[in-house]
Amino acid sequence: MMQLAHYQDKEGVFGKQFVRSHAKEMPPAKWWDKYGKAVPILCSVACSVLAQPVCASAAERNWSIYGSIKSERRTRLKHITSDRLVFCHEALHLRLKLRKSGYKEPTVKWESDSDDDDSSDEEDLKC
C-alpha cells in the first residue's frame, strides 16, 4: 500500500515532469519497466495486468452458451436459472478439460459415524 501511495502522491521519480510526459508517449509496459524500480511490487502488478490479452472471446463464448440454453423452447426460464445453467455448463467443461490433461481431483475420505458400515437398520430405511 505504501508503494501505491508513493506513486499516487507523485513522490520521488514520479514527481518529475519528464517521467509524467513519458507516461503519455511510451508504451505502458516499457514505462513501468523503466520508471517502476522504486516501487517493485506495484511495478510487478502493473506489468502482469498490462501483459493480459484483451479480447471478447470469453464473453462471446458465454453468450453462445447462454443462447443455446435459453432457446425459443425455454423462454420461460428465469434469468437466475439461466445464469446458473451457464455456470454449471462451464464448470463441467473445465472439469472435462482438466481430466483430459491428466489432472486428478483429490479424493476426500468420508469418516463413518458408525463403527460397522455393513449394518443397516431397516427402520432407518422406511419412509
Image: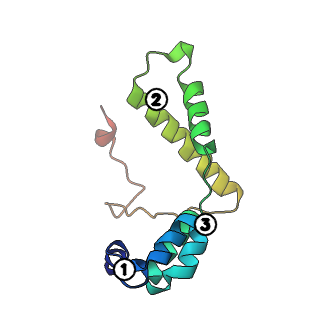
Specify the amino acid type for callout 3. Pro
Dot 1, crowdedness within 10 Å: few (<14), some or many (≥20)? some
Where does the N terminus fall, quadrant-wise? bottom left
Is residue 99 shown left or right of residue 111?
right
From mark 1 to mark 2, how far is it between C-alphas?
A: 43 Å
Q: Position of residue 105 (x, y in %)?
A: 56, 61
Q: Residue at x 58, y 66 (%)?
A: 25
Q: Which residue is mark 3?
A: 27
Specify the amino acid type for callout 1. Gln
Q: Is residue 120 above or below residue 37?
A: above
Q: Is residue 24 above or below residue 118?
A: below
Q: Residue at x 62, y 56 (%)?
A: 53
Q: Secondary structure at mark 2?
A: helix
Is residue 39 shown left or right of residue 102?
left
Q: Quarter of the image holding residue 4?
A: bottom left
User: Who is closer to the viewer here, 35 or 127?
Assistant: 35
User: Who is closer to the viewer here, 73 or 21?
Assistant: 21
Where does the C terminus fall, quadrant-wise? top left
The circle on residue 3 is 1
From mark 3 to mark 2, how far is it between C-alphas?
A: 41 Å
Q: Position of residue 11 (x, y in %)?
A: 35, 81
Could you tell which of marks 3 and 1 lies nearer the N-terminus?
1
Q: Is residue 61 above or below residue 30?
A: above
Could you tell which of marks 1 and 2 lies nearer the N-terminus?
1
